[in-house]
Amino acid sequence: MVSIKDVARDAGVSPQTVSNCINNPSIVKPATRKVVQASIARLNYTPNASARRLRTQRSNTIGIGIAPVSYSQVYDRFLHALVTEADANGIRVLLYKTDSQQDEIRQFAALAARGDVDSFVLTDTTHDDPRLAWLHEHHQPFVLFGRPWGCGAMDDPATPWVDVDGHYGIAEMTRHLILHGRKHIGFIGWPGVSGTGTDRYQGWRDAMLDARMVSGDELGQLYEEASNDIIAGQTACIALLDRRPDLDAIICVSDTLAVGAATALPNDTDIVITGFDDTVSSRSMGLSSIAQPLTESARHIIRITQEQLDAPATALTGTDGGSSAAPDADSHSASAPEIGAGADTGSGSDDVGRGTSSTAPVATPATAAATVIARDDRHILLKPTIVIR
């Protein structure tokens, strides 16, 4: 069995340096870390997880809640991506049941008190989410998959998040339809207060107004709300067509509503229906959609988690009034989304990671996959991929 001394000998460093690279990499020079990591990979060295937990006084585990009925058709795909990335970094993922936000807070308290987890990953954040208040009050590390809706300081370094820019995705889909000759494009959104729903709606609205396809007064005629189920999507589609029989396309805030809308169309119509999430349902019906980059999201969530646990307290709380750390090189990069042809991107969700940008970047043709648009390395906004069928 390969030992830490074998790795040290191969890398030409001390065993303590190897240990630091594994347990406290922030104190090791990047060049040295690269050499040690190469030796670890070459020798196929696996650290003793139990010994590491005893030495570091950490569980090396992150917790994430699961509801009795999934919030999303593709929650399992997000979870798979998260577990895969965690496993690659020697981190375990603990699942706990959550029937409500208050129930999840009780789970936080129990798991933290027993030392079962080091950090939490939260999904489906809402306006003024009480879970955030509890985590802040108890100085419990966490990362959001989604935006901290309702918070005054969206980029507070003490509230790290990874999100997908739904505003951009919907705006790009709208522009794509306009460029392909669609002139009367309706939108079916979610009712009530929803950060994600509002931003996706704004993506459609902004693209339509920018292209001068409609006046502000006419927007209401092209818009309908529906709860996130197939029957509601059917009802909303019928209502839209009754009000605007000239519609030639309908963009839906989710694939679930898109499937419902598509099944309500007359047989002889050429109206285009699009969704958001690139689920199996949309694929089976041949609907264009927008896919969320779950693998990339999981990578950033795990990276932020590791940096939280390795960083001093002032870096986590932002007590110096600045940002949590210097931005990564890719944190400010951006590229237009790839327009796919029904490819399986391994990403997408109805509600997981609800959240979008309030300002849509200007798109330019590109073949690269979606990347990052964010201000710093603890607040990551990822571009989705448009999938045209």
Image (tube, helix red, strand yellow):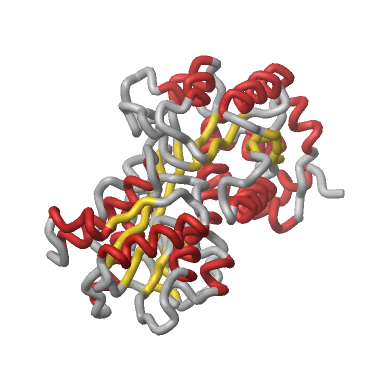
Counting the numbered discs, the total is 0
Q: Is 124 in front, or is 240?
A: 240
Along the horizontal axis of the image, is 365 left or right of 3? left
- Image coordinates of residue 8 in percent, x first then y, are 71, 44
Along the horizontal axis of the image, is 5 left or right of 137? right
Residue 330 in view (yes/no): no
Q: Residue at x 40, y 56 (%)?
A: 253
Residue 373 in view (yes/no): yes
Q: Quadrant of the C terminus?
A: bottom left
Q: Residue at x 75, y 32 (%)?
A: 52
Q: Is 47 in front, or is 378?
A: 378
- Image coordinates of residue 293 in percent, x first then y, are 49, 57
Which residue is situated farthest in the bottom direction here?
268
Q: Is 269 in front, or is 343?
A: 269
Q: Is 123 in front, or is 46?
A: 123
Which residue is situated farthest in the right direction here?
1
- Image coordinates of residue 134 in percent, x first then y, are 53, 19
Q: Residue at x 38, y 47 (%)?
A: 197
Q: Residue at x 36, y 28 (%)?
A: 151
Q: Quadrant of residue 3?
A: top right
Q: Quadrant of residue 113?
A: top right
- Image coordinates of residue 176 in percent, x first then y, are 29, 72
